[in-house]
């Protein structure tokens, strides 16, 4: 079980960081959903561009 320290910090277990691809310096989005804290790694700029290109290609082919 992870504890919150006096400054509100937590340590994500290594196995969770590994599964989510969270490495030192990774920016994460932390939000509340249905009374729970949700932590999600932000997409890298390259991933965002790839998704945008894919969406443009799909829209162009329709």
Image (cartoon, rainbow, N blue to C red):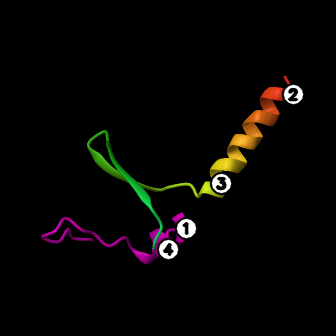
Disc 1, disc 3: CB below 8 Å?
Answer: no
Residue 39 spot, x, y in % from top left: 39, 56
The furthest residue to the right: 61
User: Can you identify the residue that label 4 sits on?
Assistant: 23
For the residues labelled 1 and 3, the Cα–Cα distance comes to 13 Å
- The numbered mark at residue 46 is none
Residue 10: image quadrant is bottom left
Residue displayed at 61% across by 55% down: 45
Q: Nearest the camera: 14 or 52?
A: 52
For the residues labelled 2 and 1, the Cα–Cα distance comes to 33 Å
Disc 1, disc 4: CB below 8 Å?
Answer: yes
For the residues labelled 2 and 3, the Cα–Cα distance comes to 21 Å
Q: Which marked residue is nearer to the observer: mark 4 or mark 3? A: 3
Up/down of 40 relative to 24, above or below: above
- Of the image marks 2 and 1, the number of the one nearer the N terminus: 1
For the residues labelled 4 and 3, the Cα–Cα distance comes to 16 Å
Residue displayed at 76% across by 41% down: 54
User: Can you identify the residue that label 3 sits on?
Assistant: 47
Residue 37 spot, x, y in % from top left: 31, 51
- Of the image marks 4 and 3, the number of the one nearer the N terminus: 4
- The numbered mark at residue 21 is 1
Label 2 SS: loop
- The numbered mark at residue 61 is 2
- Of the image marks 4 and 2, the number of the one nearer the N terminus: 4
Few, some or many residues within 10 Å of mark 3 (<14, 14–19, 20+): few
């Amino acid at each position: 079980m992870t504890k919150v320290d006096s400054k509100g910090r937590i340590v994500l277990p290594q196995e969770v960081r590994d599964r989510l691809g969270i490495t030192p310096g990774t920016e994460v989005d932390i939000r509340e959903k249905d009374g729970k804290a949700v932590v999600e790694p932000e997409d890298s700029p390259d991933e965002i561009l790839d998704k945008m290109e894919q969406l443009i290609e799909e829209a162009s082919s329709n």
